[in-house]
Image (tube, coloured by chain):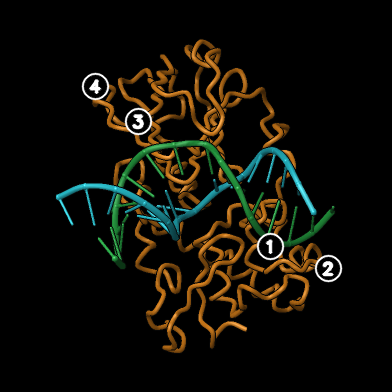
Chain colours: A orange, B green, C cyan
Amino acid sequence: MPELPEVETSRRGIAPHLTGRRILALVVRERRLRWPIPPETDARLPGQTIHGLRRRAKYLLLDLDDGVLMIHLGMSGSLRVLPATAPPGAHDHVDLLLDDGRVLRLRDPRRFGMLQWTPAPAEDHPLLRDLGPEPLSTAFSGAHLHRLARGRRAPVKTFIMDSHVVVGVGNIYASESLHLAGIHPHRPAGRIAAPRYERLAAAIRAVLEAAIAQGGTSLRDFVQEDGAPGYFRQSLRVYARAGLPCPGCGDLVRQQRIGQRSSFYCPRCQR
DNA sequence: CCGGACGCCTGTCGGC
DNA sequence: TGCCGACAGGCGTCCG
């Protein structure tokens, strides 16, 4: 599910409810996520204060008195802030009980998400250490993409979904960004000139920022912290629109599998 | 190093 | 109506 805009939407939604709060308990109903939640975690968190929430790639980072709580939403995860008395539903695997009578609740039907405590700084964690730049930071640019693409024969769509290249671009926003930039998703990454990579970097930034402004994209599972869906779905240009007219030229949007993922593009606008 | 395939899970949908 | 395969927003790991 969640790509960068959905994780950032969750961060912004839950941050006001969590910042400055003390953790009363971690209630785990199902430990078997992407990596099992170690039982030690349950005893480590109570009593700690949440000082702030950051996002790195698609990871949410809760800064505690001691260390960092990392949360990843996988394909189907979502986070809500609810009264502690709200009964948990199916797939509500973890509750973080807060000192104001509320709870941060992680729901994740497919259990591809993760929740792990790690010592600060979280940037040293093996899963974060080798990540590429944040797409909304100044470290990300067309020149960066062009430099890393040298000699790469993989399709450009696969290339921009590689977290060593740039983080946060998942299956939806890869298709959307390539359409906005007018680049065919199957084009080998190493055969795209520098000016076109400038356009692509700008497109990635624009698409992600627009999606964040709309609260992300809800296809099935994703909801914001208050249960509302994200509204960017109505702004999608090609994703999940096979057979419908391209907003640029009216030709019909095509669907093709690239790297085992569904990809959507306009055969006329994207070369 | 690179690129491609494969699991990990549950839910949903289309076709027969 | 029921069953079965395909597919779904991620990503670590393995293999050639």
Q: Where is the C terminus of chain A found, in terms of image quarters? A: bottom right
Chain letter of mark 4 equals A
Which one is in front, A190 or A124?
Answer: A190
Image location of residue A214, percent across then percent down: 39, 59
Is the residue at mark 2 from the same chain as the one at mark 1?
A: yes
> Closer to us: mark 4 or mark 1?
1
Crowdedness near tag 2: few (<14), some (14–19) or many (≥20) residues, C-alpha within 10 Å: few
Q: CA distance from mark 2 to mark 1?
A: 12 Å
Give the labeled residue for mark 3. A92
Crowdedness near tag 4: few (<14), some (14–19) or many (≥20) residues, C-alpha within 10 Å: few
Chain letter of mark 1 equals A
Q: CA distance from mark 3 to mark 2?
A: 45 Å
Residue A250: quadrant of the picture: bottom left
Q: Amino acid at mark 2?
A: Gly
Image location of residue A34, percent across then percent down: 54, 34
Residue at left offset 59%, top offset 80% = A182
Q: Earlier in the sequence, mark 3 or mark 4?
A: 4
Q: Earlier in the sequence, mark 1 or mark 3?
A: 3
Give the labeled residue for mark 4. A85
Q: Amino acid at mark 1?
A: Phe
Q: Earlier in the sequence, mark 3 or mark 2?
A: 3
Image location of residue A155, percent across then percent down: 68, 69
Crowdedness near tag 3: few (<14), some (14–19) or many (≥20) residues, C-alpha within 10 Å: some
